[in-house]
Image: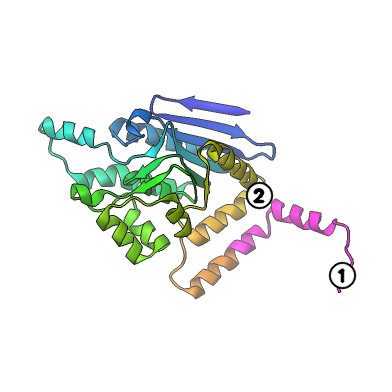
Amino acid sequence: MVEASDNDLVSLERSKQPGGGSIMRLALNRPAQLNAFNQPLHDALAHALSVVEADPPQVLIITGHGRGFCAGQDLAERMGQIEAGETIDLGEGVERKYNSLIRRVQALNCITVAAVNGVAAGAGFGLALAADIVIAARSARFVLAYGKIGLAPDAGVSWALPRLVGHARALALILTGEDMSVDDAKSWGIVWDVVADDELNHRVWTLAKRLCAGSPDAQLAAKRLIGQPAGDLGQQLDRERDAQQMLGHTEFYRAALTAFASRPKRDPVA
């Protein structure tokens, strides 16, 4: 069963799965601008995230319509504001728009999968990095051109990127503004899988359905343990203990044990 809601700039579709979970697909919809952010898109995305937060799926797919994932900030909007004589406080804009967006995406009570179907630049790159799993089409490109317009990275890029690729690579990418290929993105640990363009949708949905067959409680516990680690090993061991204690009381775990116990016995291998 599929439920869908749309506005002009963001489409949101929910597909209920046989096991009781659901998959939602959130797609940015400014294809002529490679889904670059402007104020109306921020507003539409904020509303869509409110829908997701109110009734979280087990898996949320984030992607873009057309040939781009998200090209970052729409500089044409900024130029229009300057030409109109507006005073622009970039710090206020980053806090209200991008910081809010990244915090909300990372706090979602579901597993998020970024399906990068084309260019992911600037804050669009940051949006992909905020997802739990990234799958990219062969034509995808990852671009950090902040330095070319005299800005520093935002949308969480300066936090997430060096933790994935290392300090030297992250800083060099930011300083030079060079594109990152999908092959480098995969070998450096940003992208989990790269597929042909025409296979991206199938690959992502296959993954989402596989995740929906698993325990949502266990998935969210793993997401929190990995994504928000404790300050030291001792604290992290305590968190692992508490997670296992909680999961040991779930119906999914009990059913899995029952299924394991009912399997036919096999002769031991010599």
Q: Which residue is at a point 65% across and 36% down the rendered structure image?
A: 17
Q: Which residue is at a point 49% across and 74% down the rendered structure image?
A: 233
- Please tell me in which quadrant of the rendered image residue 120 appears: top left
Q: In this rendered view, identify the residue nearer to me: 219 or 37.
A: 37
* Residue occupied by mark 1: 268
The amino acid pointed to by label 1 is Pro
Label 1 vs label 2: CA separation?
A: 29 Å
Q: Secondary structure at mark 2?
A: loop
Q: Give yes or no for contact between labels 1 and 2 (Cβ–Cβ under 8 Å).
A: no
The answer to whether residue 231 is left or right of residue 261 is left
> Percent x, y for residue 214?
65, 49
* Numbered mark located on residue 214 in the image: 2
User: Mark 1 against mark 2, which lies toward the viewer?
Assistant: 1
- The part of the chain drawn in magenta is 243-270
Tell me if residue 156 is in the magenta stretch.
no
Tell me the quadrant of the picture where the C terminus can be found.
Answer: bottom right
Q: Is residue 155 visible?
A: yes
Q: Compared to 85, does 204 lie above or below?
A: below
